[in-house]
Amino acid sequence: MERRDFFKKAAVVAGAAAVGSSTAEANLTHQPIDNRKVSTVAFPEKRPLIMYSDRPPLLETPREVFTSALTPNDQFFVRWHMPDIPTHIDPDTFTISVNGLVEKELKISLNELKTKFEQVEVTAVLQCGGNSRSAFTPIAGGIQWGSGAMGCATWKGVRLSDILDHAGLKRDAEWIGFNGSEKAAYYETPNFVRELHLDELDDHVILAYEMNGEDLPYLNGYPLRLIIPGTYSDSWVKMLSNITVTNKYKHLFFMDVAYRVPDNKCECETPQKKAPKTKPIRKMNVKSVIGYPTNGAKINNKSAVVVRGVAWDDGHGIQDVMISLDGGKTWDKALLDDGKLGRYAYRTFRYTFKPLEFGEKTIMAKAINKIGQEQPFDKEIKWNHGGYKYNGIDKVTVEVV
Amino acid sequence: MKKMILITVLLASSLFAQVKENIEVPYVAFPIKMGKGFDAVQANCLMCHSFGYIINQGRQSRQFWRGKVDKMIKHFKAPIDEKSAKIVTDYLFEHYGNNKEK
């Protein structure tokens, strides 16, 4: 995709991130829509972000935020499913219920969570499965996110396993259902409930009440949310209010219909021939995003530029980030941070170069993880109907002046 | 001793949300297109989601939009009758369509 095309696609109408009219010609996936402007509207506890909807709130983090390992709370993306989210929660009376196949049903207050259980922290990337969906051609259904339906934070809370141990799982316990407090307009609409199999839950899964040293912002799930490091955020239930243990999988819309990819090796299909079987999106694939410079930025000739960005995967860890300045013909290693935030966090990278020619210059970044998986070129990404799991090599084009 | 210190720190930290009163999510007027069938869209879609949710799906085929309307009826239990479903689909395809039936 040519630069001017995606500028054209980034058309902004009256503060909304409306999609432009150009449709890509061939069935080749391309760079996600970029350079959408932040809205003039600031949502509660947030700075103005790229805005797609007010009800439910859908907000995207602009690209330039992705130069540091932790995403500030007030710039962290927002994605809800239902129109009615509680606008007031009293932390003194709030409780989380644990019930179903347990020895002892529990109602735990926030204060008890913070004082009666071991407090743990994990730094982990939270990314929507549909992040970068606007890259897919033909246009996949769903919000046409750019690259910013994601963020990374240090989450503090208690281990889910400690809570379940405290309740005592009965022998036939197998599935854990998680329920948030968001409500639909109609009584019959299914609640946003997610189920996880006991095998999917390890000690890294926590119930978090704190994000980057502050209470969770309302729009990120105050007062408590589920954190499942390494997986896409569809199961990171916000405003978590209830945990039910069962022995049988319940069929749920948000499990059986939404957030699924073709169950085949390439996880791909065509609009004409959809895959007969699907599977949950689950683990994140290896990906990187350049935070600086951004598309269309002007940089000075013969003046050193430090390219910065973030890279992550599902917890195997990032081995290298490679940079190309010649359209992907040759690649050079970027410098990585010390990785002290752990294997589920963003790994920041930086790469210094000195432009020696005037005009357009394209910078590409490709992450490679510790088991050798690497990002494909954008046009090599195969289509799926939900536009999930895009992880094409990132690309920004600047003007050397 | 170490445990004591930890507990003191915890008690000292805030147990309150940063926002103590009701939060208010702002209302946004999206640039939705006017035209035949708009009344049906307003009556049947706006109950659950903003116009932003519609216009940020990208240009799509008639089949896609009909599928979305059906999803709202089947999975989200929106009480939309067949006549309205048709009108809404026609509107969506006319204003946010890609000129392809499928």
Image: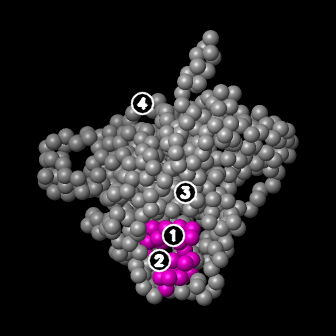
**Which region shows up in magenta?**
B37-66
Q: Residues within 10 Å of mark 1 (few under 14, many from 20)?
A: many
Which residue position is annotated with label 3?
A80
Q: Are marks 1 and 2 in contact (CB under 8 Å)?
A: yes
Q: Is residue A44 visible?
A: yes
Type of the residue with mark 3: Trp
Per the image, is B43 magenta? Answer: yes
Please identify, in this view, whether the residue under mark 3 or under mark 1 is nearer the observer: 3
Q: At 41% across and 59% down in the image, what residue appears?
A: A51
Q: CA distance from mark 3 to mark 2?
A: 23 Å
Which of the labelled discs sits on residue A141, or is there none?
Answer: 1
SS at mark 4 in the image: loop
The residue carrying pointer 3 sits among few (fewer than 14), some (14 to 19) or many (20 or more) residues within 10 Å by Cα, namely many
Name the amino acid, label 2. Gln
Mark 1: secondary structure = loop
> What residue is shown with label 2?
B60
Q: Chain of mark 4?
A: A
Give yes or no for contact between labels 1 and 4 (Cβ–Cβ under 8 Å).
no
Camera-near label (3 vs 2) is 3
Dot 2 lies on which element? loop
Chain ID of residue with mark 2:
B
- Locate residue A108, reporting x and y percent: 71, 37
Kindly tell me whether residue B98 is visible in this rendering.
no
